[in-house]
Image (cartoon, rainbow, N blue to C red):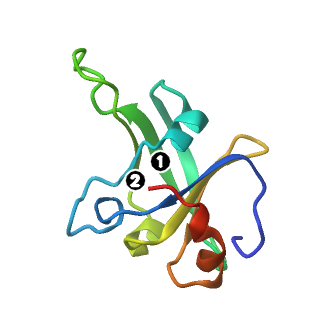
């Protein structure tokens, strides 16, 4: 349930860009690999499952994640990390400007919680987001 605060041992707040949220701009289903995500996932490829939810609403949606270097086979290029996510009900309604909290709970489960732009929680947390 996403109606109460989650306790993360590590997390990242990220404002969604058009290419991360708008299927008309990109159908890649990826979050840009900002520094805070690198501190959570490191520099090694990782595939796992995550729980997606919407802040203030009941229910969870599970989907696979893959953390990877999009340039891993290009030795002459610097790393460019991405967090790929499978289609799911939460991200299907995400929009540019919404905030996503990506974090590890106390049992190392990954949660991705969407905070809709304009919601009470969005106003509270949006000034901490990173692009």
Estimate the x, y position of residue 12 in percent, counting from the top left: 59, 51
Among the two numbered marks 1 and 2 on one chain, the one whose residue lies closer to the N terminus: 1
Q: Which mark is residue 13?
A: none
Instruction: Residue 47: tell me if it is visible.
Output: yes
Left or right: residue 8 compared with residue 130: right
- Residue pictured at 39% horizontal, 33% vertical: 68
Q: Which residue is mark 1?
A: 64
- Residue pictured at 24% horizontal, 22% vertical: 77
Q: Residue furthest front?
A: 127
Residue 92, image quadrant = bottom left
Estimate the x, y position of residue 81 in percent, counting from the top left: 38, 35
- Residue pictured at 53% horizontal, 62% vertical: 100
Q: Secondary structure at mark 2?
A: loop
Vertical placement of residue 36 versus 127, above or below: above
Q: Which residue is mark 2?
A: 86
Q: Residues within 10 Å of mark 1 (few under 14, many from 20)?
A: some
Q: How many marks?
A: 2
Estimate the x, y position of residue 118 in percent, counting from the top left: 53, 84
- Residues marked 1 and 2 touching at CB (< 8 Å): yes
Q: Secondary structure at mark 1?
A: strand
Left or right: residue 39 compared with residue 71: right
**Front residue of 124 and 49:** 124
Estimate the x, y position of residue 41 in percent, counting from the top left: 55, 34
Give the distance between the C-alpha atoms of the residues marked 1 and 2, in whole angstroms.
Answer: 5 Å
- Residue pictured at 44% horizontal, 56% vertical: 131
Q: Residues within 10 Å of mark 2 (few under 14, many from 20)?
A: some
């Amino acid at each position: 349930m996403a109606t109460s605060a989650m306790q993360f041992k590590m997390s990242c707040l990220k404002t969604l860009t058009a290419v991360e949220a708008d299927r008309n701009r990109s159908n890649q289903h990826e979050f840009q690999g900002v520094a805070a995500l690198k501190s959570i996932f490191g520099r090694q490829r990782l595939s796992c499952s995550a729980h997606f939810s919407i802040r203030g609403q009941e229910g969870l949606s599970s989907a696979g994640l893959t953390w990877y270097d999009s340039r891993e086979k290009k030795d002459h290029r610097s790393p460019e990390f991405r967090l790929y996510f499978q289609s799911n009900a939460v991200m299907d309604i995400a929009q540019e400007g919404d905030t996503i909290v990506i974090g590890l709970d106390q049992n190392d489960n990954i949660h991705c919680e969407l905070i809709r732009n304009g919601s009470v929680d969005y106003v509270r947390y949006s000034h901490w987001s990173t692009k």
